[in-house]
Image: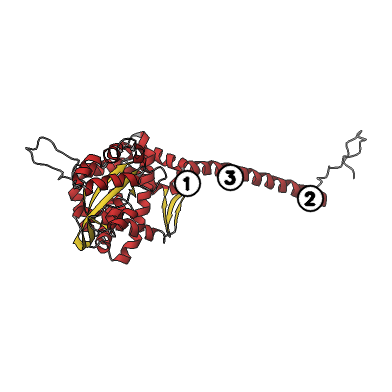
Amino acid sequence: MSLRRKGDSSVPKKRKEHTEWVITKGRLSRWQREQRWRRVIIIIGCVIVAIVLALVGYAVYASAFKPFHQTILRVNDKSFDMDYYIKMLRLYGIKGVPESDQHYLAQNVLGAIENNEIHKQLAPTLGIAVTEEEVDAEIQNQFIPPEPPEDTPDKGPLSYADFLKRLEEMGASEKDFRAQISADLLTKKIREYIGERDTPAEMPQALVQGILIEIGAEAEVEEETEGEGETEGSKDPEKVREAIKARLDDGEEFAVLAEEFSQDIASKDDGGDLGWLSRDIMSMYYNEEFADVAFHLQLETLSHPIPESASDDNSRYWLIQVLERDDSRPLEEDQREMLKAQAVSDWFREQRDKFTIEHYLNPDLRAWAIDKALE
């Protein structure tokens, strides 16, 4: 039986059925594309942010950190970076050097680093080393005790403790300072060893007198011996020699003529006495020809004019006499020290040529290092 209300002629409404959302292939494909693009955009954004951060980080690293780790010198397999170089500049006292001399000091410091490393690598082959006790002793020699006597009006030089404080303020440490002291001592030991080893205590020597003539300054010699009109001959060293020889043959003393005509300030007041000289000293003081003549010239015979230098415009010549020769005469101390220094220099140059040395410090980097060392 129908329950419709009387008079209600309308047809009962059907309940609207809920239609489920069906995922079709087209909708799925579009959704997947949207998700994919969303991920791509996120990834691109992250990459951009990462690149920006990387660029900023690299800029900071390149300007503030990288230069400190940049290699400025390599000696064989040992490398030295900018940070070490800056510490050495501070240790060598660049803050107390006038600005005009700072680049000169900076170049010398680089050379010192190189030389110290060469000595360090050569030391084991020579059986030479530096102990911590030797470093301590050297430091004690350089600094006074921290507390001088009370009656001392002036505390004097800087104490070691105060020096370390200043060193720390400069960005260096006691370890850096001790390492530098050790390097200096090692170099000194090696130089002393090589000098003693390669320099004999006795050498063949000759006792020499000399007159240094300057062409154009000896006209009076010509005038006195050859008469008027012969002054032009003073431009010829052979004619000057003949003039002086003539006066020697007439009985005048070599010393008197040396005092009168020699242009060598160091010896003219001593009558031209050049002293006992070895061949090596002659080569260093004068030249090879001087040494050859001195060891072959007949005794008490006036030599031919020996050019003071090999330059084309040379106008000064030596006239020498050899009074004695000795095949084995002890060297004077000052001469032996000079020969030691030369022996060490020759040895070091020969050894250095065997090393592989690479420099990377250009003027701009050196200027940057100086600025950092002065901070």
Mark 3 residue type: Ala
Badge 1 or badge 3: first in the primary sequence: 3
| Position in image of residue 221 (x %, y %) | 28, 40
Determine which residue is flagged by label 2: 29
Nearest to the eye among marks 1 and 3: give it.
1
| Position in image of residue 76 (x %, y %) | 43, 59
Q: Residue at x 31, y 62 (%)?
A: 123
Looking at this view, is 229 or 316 the one in front?
229
- Could you tell me if the residues under marks 2 and 1 are in contact, i.e. CB atoms within 8 Å? no
Nearest to the eye among marks 3 and 2: give it.
3
Q: Is residue 240 above or below residue 200?
A: above
Circle 2 residues within 10 Å: few <14, some 14–19, many ≥20? few
Looking at this view, is 3 or 259 the one in front?
259
Mark 2 residue type: Ser
Q: Residue at x 28, y 59 (%)?
A: 295
Circle 1 residues within 10 Å: few <14, some 14–19, many ≥20? some
Q: Is residue 179 above or below residue 99?
A: below
- Label annotation for residue 373: none
| Position in image of residue 368 (x %, y %) | 43, 40
Using the rendered image of the protein, determine whether residue 179 is visible from the camera's viewpoint. Answer: no
Q: Quadrant of residue 358?
A: bottom left
| Position in image of residue 15 (x %, y %) | 84, 42
Determine which residue is flagged by label 3: 50
Badge 3 or badge 2: first in the primary sequence: 2
Determine the secondary structure under disc 3.
helix
Nearest to the eye among marks 2 and 1: give it.
1
- Label annotation for residue 66: 1
Q: Is residue 124 above or below residue 18?
A: below
Mark 1 residue type: Lys
Q: Quadrant of residue 158?
A: top left
